[in-house]
Image: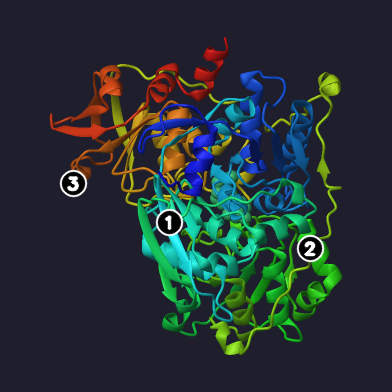
Amino acid sequence: MKLPLARKIIDSHIIDGIPEKGREVGLRIDQTLTQDATGTMAYLEFEAIGIPRVRTERSVAYIDHNTLQSGFENADDHRFIGSIAKKHGVWFSRPGNGICHQVHLERFGIPGKTLIGSDSHTPTAGGIGMLAIGAGGLDVAVAMGGGAYYITYPEIVNVRLTGKLNDWVAAKDVILEVLRIMSVKGGVGKIIEYSGDGVSTLSVPERATITNMGAELGATTSIFPSDEITRAFMKAEGREQDWKPLSADDDAEYDEVITIDLSSLEPLAACPHSPDNVKKISEIGKIKIDQVCIGSCTNSSLLDMMKVAYILKGKTVHPDVSLSIAPGSKQVLGMMSRNGSLSSLIESGARILESACGPCIGMGQSPNSGGISLRTFNRNFEGRSGTKDAGIYLVSPEVAAASAINGYLTDPRELGTMPDFIIPDVFDVNDNMIERPADEKDAENIIVLKGPNIKNYPETTPVTDSLDLTVSLKVGDNITTDHIMPAGAKILPLRSNIPAISKHCFVACDPEFPERAVREAPSVIIGGANYGQGSSREHAALAPLYLGVKAVIAKSFARIHRANLINAGILPLELANENDYDLIKQGDKISINDIHCSLISGEFTVETESGKKIAARCKLSERMRDILKAGGLLAYTKSRLN
Ligand code: MIC
Ligand code: SF4
């Protein structure tokens, strides 16, 4: 059979299971990454597993999310991660060095290797032909210990790109078009593989924008071939020796094909409050704006920044607009300072932020009340910016910069002919902010520094044979992990403290939830379709666990969150008939019996107080069943090591 590229990489990394669509396979993981907001838990979990040194080819810990230090907590977490990384063989990218996905692409990613990261945008590295997947922290901890990472053997969707983008139409518009076509749940269980003659017209940073935001499709990952353009990028990073050519076989067989003619695209925006609510800028019209934020792991490369600088040069940001810009890495910021583009930004009045996630995760720069904010980011969920009634539009850097000058949403094609933006052949490489791990012989002298806000992994219990549960919450479709476990500058510092962070669980939907869940425990949450989309944060499973939630019954689940629920020992049940969603209300009592048999058959019966029987499903591999019976992945891994 003629193989897609993703299948070639998967098949060469399978260490457990049979490669058949829909079945679970375990992959050997070559590299891992963590960031600080999920990393504290991941390293506590790694410590609890008890393996002294990572067994991957490369593991890297980044500090990029929780960089506003308005109390001791974030600084303590940085110190904890730095010290535990050093001890256990993990490289450490210090705060200020940049956003994990940008830096990993620049300094560590290798075509053809596997990478899992405790961040949903890990697929960014698919831009250089890596099989890069977002996962929960505990899955990353297990992979660091040399364990396999399990995925459902995916369907592969081929997005064939033809033609070439017109002036001022960007890679962001390509992925927004894919989101318009496939929706935020269209990618679940699938890998998106790009091919076609349009690929050679896109640089690595542009490809990485597309694979990055493939996370918003719910896809397992996205991948581009590794070609001469990839080689030039790796050479510019001084890493040509890590390059190799990779592509699908000619006439490879795919499960689905989508063709996009790049030359037919025009500037697009994802309108509030979902990344798939995509419209043409020309259709939306010249709406007045209050804020523009440029940066994030989607759009903060040197190429993006050079385009923004060109547009801002000699102009002033509109008086009604606040413009903030966070370059993606120290490398990008340094090169901008040397090629003059940084001064164009400064002169225009842009507010230059450190190289970090910043406003993307609500770490500052919340818009004004009812504000309209254009952002080059990847998520515009309601409230994620920190201002509940703000309207966030996701756009390209070109749209963002042109609009910041005009004060209204602007089609950048109004700027006329676009110059050629030439990325240098050699990048300024300086890894002085990346700390090497200690040598194995020195590791035992390294003391892991834990602050008072760092608490252990919560207790889990094996799934029992029957459950009598109260419905502590009922929510609708497309609930994000930002609803379940909000981020932002106030709550993020509690990421290493599950008892404290659980007090904020679901408050975006219902401020009474945390107290009610404790009062009514054990309880169950009822959800709609695509429950748990968005971030990889396992806190969205650990906080409900801590509050006594034993099961979630939903119309369907997002991939990473479903895995996180199982890893935490919580049952994720899917309604066999979506209409049965209407039969259960908040406050109802339900019971689930014969659970141990149901775990094997995958068929569950949920009985309501009035005696109605509702069919639910949960397709589990033997491994997942054992995880649930052990009381979660940590207990399962420990028992297997023993
Ligand atoms: C996000 O973009 O939502 C985050 C913050 O990067 C998360 C990880 C987290 O919640 O810490 C993600 O995408 O996985
Ligand atoms: Fe950071 Fe935003 Fe990227 Fe998440 S999406 S890794 S918060 S920049």
Q: Amino acid at mark 1?
A: Asn
Residue 280 seen: yes
Determine which residue is flagged by label 2. Answer: 333
Above or below residue 175? Residue 151 is above
Q: CA distance from mark 3 to mark 2?
A: 52 Å
Q: CA distance from mark 1 to mark 2?
A: 35 Å
Q: Earlier in the sequence, mark 3 or mark 2?
A: 2
Q: Is residue 184 left or right of residue 164?
A: left
Above or below residue 123? Residue 117 is above
Category of crowding for the residue at label 3, using alpha-carbon neighbours closer than 10 angstroms: few (below 14), some (14–19), many (at least 20): few
Query: Who's the residue at 47% across and 43% down the image?
Result: 7
Label 1 close to label 3 by CB (< 8 Å) = no
Q: Secondary structure at mark 1?
A: strand
Q: Amino acid at mark 2?
A: Leu
Q: Amino acid at mark 3?
A: Asn
Q: CA distance from mark 1 to mark 3?
A: 33 Å
Observer-nearest residue: 139 or 632? 139
Q: Earlier in the sequence, mark 1 or mark 3?
A: 1
- Picture coordinates of residue 5 (x, y %)? 51, 48
Residue 394 seen: no
Where residue 264 sits, quadrant-wise, is bottom left
- Picture coordinates of residue 91 (x, y %)? 76, 37
Query: Who's the residue at 49% across and 85% down the image?
Result: 286
* Disc 3 Cβ-to-ligand 1 distance below 8 Å: no
Q: Which mark is residue 158?
A: 1
Which quarter of the figure is the C terminus placed in? top right
Where residue 307 sits, quadrant-wise, is bottom right
Q: Earlier in the sequence, mark 1 or mark 2?
A: 1
Determine which residue is flagged by label 3. Answer: 579
